[in-house]
Amino acid sequence: MGLPQIAPMLAAAGSLPPADVEDRWAFEVKQDGQRAMAYLPGDGSTVLRSRSGADISALYPELAALGSVLGQPTVLDGEIVALDRKGRSDFERLQSRMGLASAAKAARMAQVVPAHLVLFDAVYLDGHRLTGLPYAERRALLEGLGLDGKHWSTPAAVVGHGAQALEMTRTAGLEGLVAKRLNSVYEPGVRSRSWIKIRHARTVDVIVGGWVPGRGRLTGLPGALLVGEAREGGLRYVGSVGTGWSDTERTTLAELLQVAAIDDCPFDNTPHVAGARWVLPRLVGEVHYATRTRAGLLRHPSWHRLRPDLAPDDIA
């Protein structure tokens, strides 16, 4: 293809930059989709590559026309999303487009769940590698390309005003922000502190109904908790939580789970989780999560704390 293969730069999780230096940062809406590098040789063709470098062009035929818009060799960084009725990226919708086995099926699904490519960086343009330029300059070059169409766009980035931008995304039901240092270079394949992803932390009290044993050094300890919410006199499974504990908390939970062991699944909707062990639904915990699926499952859940002050009836 004649274009350099460039691995995407990755953002580190964090919080908003301090207010006294926020004018050194740009803020973009965090998209919830599939990361993609778009390779446009300038001959009308388009090649899309995933974060791993795999060619995913055939999965998204509606994005093929992007190559005909630019007549110069270009490599762009972006995120493929599926939008809901309010124009928000919806990863659950996009999943129906990912991993399809045939081009014919991908073409049919493109009519049902159209994909949209959100562009946010330019890393190669007209024979010149741009990775050594500051973000502000790369962003200006990207915006100068005027890439806004039915299936792709270049949403605005806001300099400063981070707290206001974060609140706007919360009110709009979006996942959060990505803060990018204006003078930062593009670091291919690196998870850099020059890009900070800030997710909205939602919190929910859940009831523990089971667990999955850990492996290796975690043998005998919980590797994940299976949690639910009280619904209409029963316990509705809402997800598996496998992060957020300290070693001490994990040991404490293991002792409580052993005491509460039972043979039968306490959930109304039995989760299909290999190696699951069931417990009396009496332990209450607080969990942070990003969003929910349409089925009510928690996305990106993280354990926050045990709530010994609460009984299951208190959160029903």
Image (cartoon, helix red, strand yellow):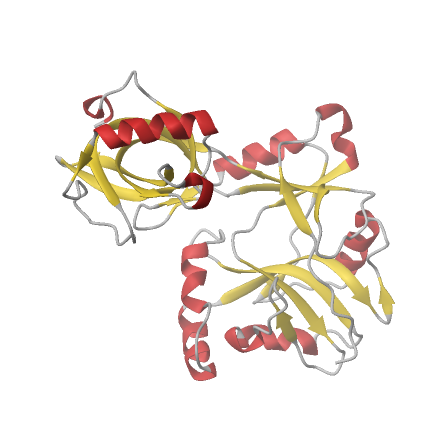
In the figure, 176 relative to 38: above or below?
A: above
Residue in view at x 26 percent, y 27 percent: 283
Tell me the quadrant of the picture where the C terminus can be found. top left
Residue 85 coordinates in the image, percent (x, y): 42, 55
Q: Nearer the viewer, residue 252 or 161?
A: 252
Residue in view at x 52 percent, y 52 percent: 32
Residue 119 coordinates in the image, percent (x, y): 66, 59
Residue 13 lies in quadrant: top right
Residue 145 lies in quadrant: bottom right
Looking at the image, residue 293 sits to the left or right of residue 42; the answer is left
Residue 79 lies in quadrant: bottom right
Residue in view at x 36 percent, y 31 percent: 204
Looking at the image, residue 309 sits to the left or right of residue 45; the answer is left
Q: Nearer the viewer, residue 151 or 89?
A: 89
Residue 84 visible (yes or no): no
Residue 205 coordinates in the image, percent (x, y): 32, 29
Tell me the quadrant of the picture where the N terminus can be found. bottom right
Residue 123 coordinates in the image, percent (x, y): 78, 61
